[in-house]
Amino acid sequence: MNNYVNQLIEGKIDFEGQKKVEEIVRNTLIGTTVVSFALGFVLQSLRVTFGTFGLSAVVLLLVAVPQWPMYNRNPVEWLPIKEAKESEKK
Amino acid sequence: MHTNYARISNISATLSSCMMALLAAIALSSFLFTADPKGDLHVASVQVVPGNARRYANKHQEFAFVNFNVTADLSPLFNWNTKQVFLYLGAEYTNKQGVVNEVVIWDKIVRNKEDARLDVSGRNKYVFRELSTSFNPPANYTLKYNVMPYVGVLTYGEAARTLEPVAFPQQHQL
């Protein structure tokens, strides 16, 4: 139980997952900035701009931070344990 | 990006950079909105009253009371980045000693587009006092505004001016 909670708090994901998260975060933030500016400018309301920006930021945090299973689809293949050599065991 | 903490750290850093870029874009967008609204300013009456300086009871200074009417439509100044417009009525004159004075005698803060259609008759809010004894040459009254944005640079402008200088009534000798 303790181990499970620790793993959840740490939230480790594999390398392919990290690449995916990086991509998602970068694209979403740039896209959100542009879209919220454009929407606000057209509707002439700063409230619309910051509303959409804040909402997308919250959604992004929910999508990118927790350890979702889609980020753990390519676990690292560790090599099998090698027997220690007799000469190293002094 | 390997732990929750790393992801949160990365996201918040990129988010704040994006937020700064957004604010810069909003500040720059203010330059696209150019408006030069004009209005009418009419001074109904000026009364001059003798009095004394605040600190020296023997020093003679004069006080003026100005009644005016202002009509102006300042709604073109309001865009998405306008927080409020600060209006002020100033009296410009050069006194006998040759000193150029501009005295703000009334001001108003306008916070939204609906209140920007002005139709005010008032008198001076602030004390209009001539520090060097007496008012002599006539004064020009101007209505100026200062646009305060949410993000960006402050801009100033003049909305109305009295067409001819308004004279101060002369004091009759007692």
Image: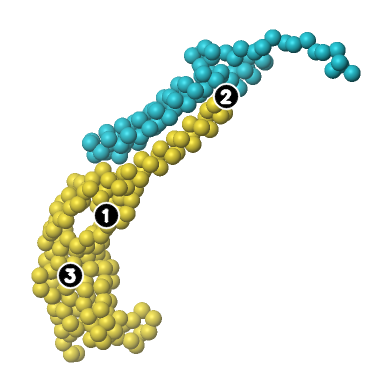
Query: Amino acid under label 1?
Result: Val
Query: Amino acid under label 3?
Result: Tyr
From the image, state the color of chain A.
Answer: cyan
Label 1 belongs to which residue?
Answer: B147
**Relative to the observer, which residue lies in front, B174 or B160?**
B160
Q: Would you place residue B50 above or below residue A88 in this image? A: below
**Image location of residue B129, percent across then percent down:** 27, 76
**Relative to the observer, which residue lies in front, B55 or A81?**
A81
The residue under the point 89% across, 18% down is A90
Q: Would you place residue B92 above or below residue B60 in this image? A: above
Residue B67: quadrant of the picture: bottom left
- Label 1 marks which chain's residue? B
In contact (CB < 8 Å): disc 2 and disc 3 = no
Which sits earlier in the primary sequence, circle 2 or circle 3? 2
Residue A35: quadrant of the picture: top left
The residue under the point 33% across, 86% down is B59
- Label 3 marks which chain's residue? B
Q: Residue furthest left?
A: B163
Which sits earlier in the primary sequence, circle 2 or circle 1? 2
The residue under the point 25% across, 79% down is B100
Label 3 crowd bin: few (<14), some (14–19), many (20+), radius 10 Å: many
Which sits earlier in the primary sequence, circle 3 or circle 1? 3
In contact (CB < 8 Å): disc 3 and disc 1 = no
**Image location of residue A5, percent across then percent down:** 62, 17
Label 2 belongs to which residue?
Answer: B2
Supply the letter of whichever chain is yellow. B
Of the two numbered discs 3 and 1 in the rendering, the one whose residue sits closer to the viewer: 1
